[in-house]
Image (cartoon, rainbow, N blue to C red):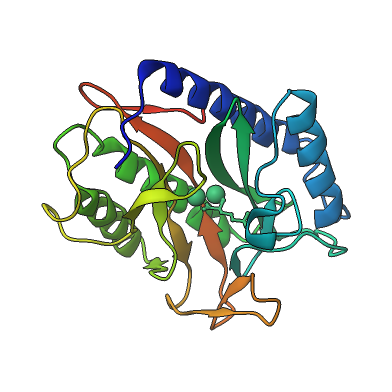
């Protein structure tokens, strides 16, 4: 497990802040009619104009700057000519690298008027992320995070995708440890001051099962139900946590 110095955490916070600002900026463009490819370009332009790198591009051959998923798409959606329409939900998941350090953040956005049940699911998934973040402190365990997230998800009628997990992050986008969105309290790696992890619940309105599409990237729900995803990059501090992908 990598322990990051104060200097490294400061750099990750710079990357994370640009990531946060890019997400904020995208709120302006998420409207019926825009294509996911157009959103991808806006994201790239914003990141580059802030002196940073959209590091998803080319990662294991990924062909775009952001993973963009609509409705039943869970992760790794490839931007294209699909137009957003009223009532959709769209998830923007991208990394920003600056001065050699990564940040990873995801938000789910509403497109126009969304079914109240789906809107509720979006709110509940964001809260599930914060339930996971709240347990982060030195001495807590990775299993405590997954326990908190899955407990909240299940008590709000949502299922937890298990095939994809959060992760350590630093000079690489994906580092140890894995951070599952399920787990038992008191199990798994012990968190220490200076560790940085990406916590990212992916919750479904239907069953938890997912399938991989023929493009070998995009994961969708098997039953076609909507899926929701929020992610922050979080640092373990002396007495708790700090969200690095924030204001
Ligand atoms: N940002 C994703 C995550 O949360 C990873 C994207 S990998 C890519 O871990 F290749 F699709 F960019
Ligand atoms: Co991500
Ligand atoms: Co991630």
User: Is 196 rendered above or below residue 210?
Assistant: above
**Quadrant of the rendering where the N terminus is positioned:** top left
Q: Dividing the picture into quarters, in which one does residue 215 lie?
A: bottom right
Q: Residue at x 56, y 46 (%)?
A: 106
Residue 57 placement, left or right of 247: right
> How many marks overall?
0
Residue 242 placement, left or right of 46: left
Q: Residue furthest left?
A: 186
Q: Residue at x 43, y 16 (%)?
A: 7
Q: Position of residue 28 (x, y in %)?
A: 78, 35
Between residue 85 and residue 185, name the one nearer to us: 185
User: Is 97 rendered above or below residue 38?
Assistant: above
Residue 187 placement, left or right of 28: left
Q: Position of residue 156 (x, y in %)?
A: 35, 60
Between residue 114 and residue 172, name the one nearer to us: 172
User: Is 118 rendered above or below residue 198?
Assistant: below
Q: Residue at x 46, y 46 (%)?
A: 126
**Quadrant of the rendering where the C terminus is positioned:** top right
Q: Residue at x 64, y 70 (%)?
A: 217
Q: Dividing the picture into quarters, in which one does residue 223 lie?
A: bottom right
Between residue 201 and residue 9, name the one nearer to us: 9
Q: Position of residue 11 (x, y in %)?
A: 51, 21
Q: Position of residue 52 (x, y in %)?
A: 69, 29
Residue 205 placement, left or right of 24: left
């Amino acid at each position: 497990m990598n322990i990051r110095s104060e200097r490294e955490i400061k750099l990750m916070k710079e990357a994370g802040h640009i990531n946060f600002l890019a997400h904020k900026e995208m709120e302006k463009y998420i409207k019926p009619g825009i294509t996911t490819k157009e959103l991808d370009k806006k994201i790239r332009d914003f990141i580059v104009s802030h002196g940073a790198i959209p590091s998803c591009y080319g990662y294991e051959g990924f062909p775009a700057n952001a993973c963009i998923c609509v409705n039943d798409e869970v992760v790794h959606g490839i931007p294209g000519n699909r137009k957003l329409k009223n009532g959709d939900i769209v998830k923007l998941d991208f990394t920003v690298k600056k001065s050699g350090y990564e940040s990873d953040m995801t938000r789910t956005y509403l497109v126009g008027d969304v079914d109240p049940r789906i809107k509720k699911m979006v709110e509940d998934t964001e809260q599930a992320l914060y339930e996971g973040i709240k347990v982060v402190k030195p001495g807590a365990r990775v299993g405590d995070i997954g326990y908190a997230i899955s407990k909240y998800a299940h008590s709000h009628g949502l299922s937890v995708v298990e095939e994809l997990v959060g992760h350590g992050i630093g000079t690489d986008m994906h580092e140890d440890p894995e951070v599952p969105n399920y787990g038992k309290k008191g199990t798994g790696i012990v968190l220490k001051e200076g560790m940085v992890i990406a916590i990212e619940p992916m919750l479904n309105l239907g069953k938890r099962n997912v399938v991989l599409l023929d493009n070998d990237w995009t994961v969708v729900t098997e039953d076609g139900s909507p899926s929701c995803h929020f992610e922050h990059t979080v640092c373990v501090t002396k007495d708790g946590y700090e969200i690095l992908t924030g204001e």
